[in-house]
Amino acid sequence: VRLSKNIVKVAGKTMEKNLTRLGPYVLPLSEQAKVVISLVARFVFKTLGKLLGTKKLPNIKVYVPDFKRGIDHFCIHAGGRAVIDGIEKNMKLEKFHTEPSRMTLMNYGNTSSSSIWYELEYIMEHQRSNPLKKGDRVMQVAFGSGFKCCSGVWLKL
């Protein structure tokens, strides 16, 4: 078995598709509105560019929502430092958001997608920088073969 260096890129694309489906259920309306506005603006500018036959109109990028606005804790598949670093960078997470994943990787190694349960336990029992409180949302993201991405969001009662 050989893993290429594209694994972080593939994981990112797979996770993007997964979070696109999950977003409407967990993001606040303000974040959802920013996405919709950017999509409409992009469509309008592309259509105007085609109608006017010009390429001088600005290229509008789709807004990437800030999942930290709807999620308090992240359990990211501890498949390796590169995976955690890539997700931390792309989602603009703080160090305390990826602390459970890094500690799980350090303590247990790469235990495949089961690592998300060790991370949840770390958040519940050990994390002091961002303790779990009533009403907090915890997002678990795991990767699987083929390349699959699965996520779940839990609410602390």
Image (tube, rainbow, N blue to C red):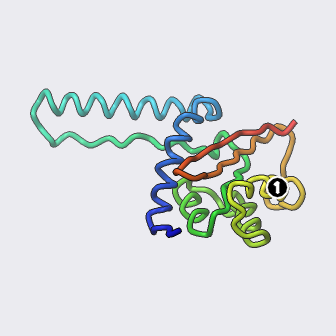
The reply, left or right, for residue 88 in relation to residue 100 is left
At 52% from the left and 51% from the top, the residue drawn is: 147
Residue 32 percent coordinates (x, y): 53, 31
Tell me the SS state at disc 1: helix
Near mark 1 (Cα within 10 A), the count class, few <14, some 14-19 or many ≥20, is: many
At 50% from the left and 48% from the top, the residue drawn is: 14
The reply, left or right, for residue 119 in relation to residue 54 is right
At 9% from the left and 33% from the top, the residue drawn is: 53
Quadrant of the image occupied by residue 45: top left
Q: From the viewer's perspective, is residue 58 above or below residue 83?
A: above
Quadrant of the image occupied by residue 57: top left
The reply, left or right, for residue 79 in relation to residue 99 is left
Residue 41 percent coordinates (x, y): 34, 31
Q: Residue furthest left?
A: 53
Q: Quadrant of the C terminus?
A: top right
Residue at mark 1 = 123
Residue 152 percent coordinates (x, y): 69, 40
Q: Nearer the viewer, residue 81 or 51?
A: 81
Q: Residue furthest bottom?
A: 106
The amino acid at mark 1 is Ile
Q: Nearer the viewer, residue 7 or 81?
A: 7
* Count of number-bearing discs: 1
Q: Nearer the viewer, residue 32 or 116?
A: 116
Q: Nearer the viewer, residue 46 or 14?
A: 14
Quadrant of the image occupied by residue 43: top left
At 57% from the left and 63% from the top, the residue drawn is: 83
Residue 73 percent coordinates (x, y): 73, 49
The reply, left or right, for residue 106 in relation to residue 148 is right
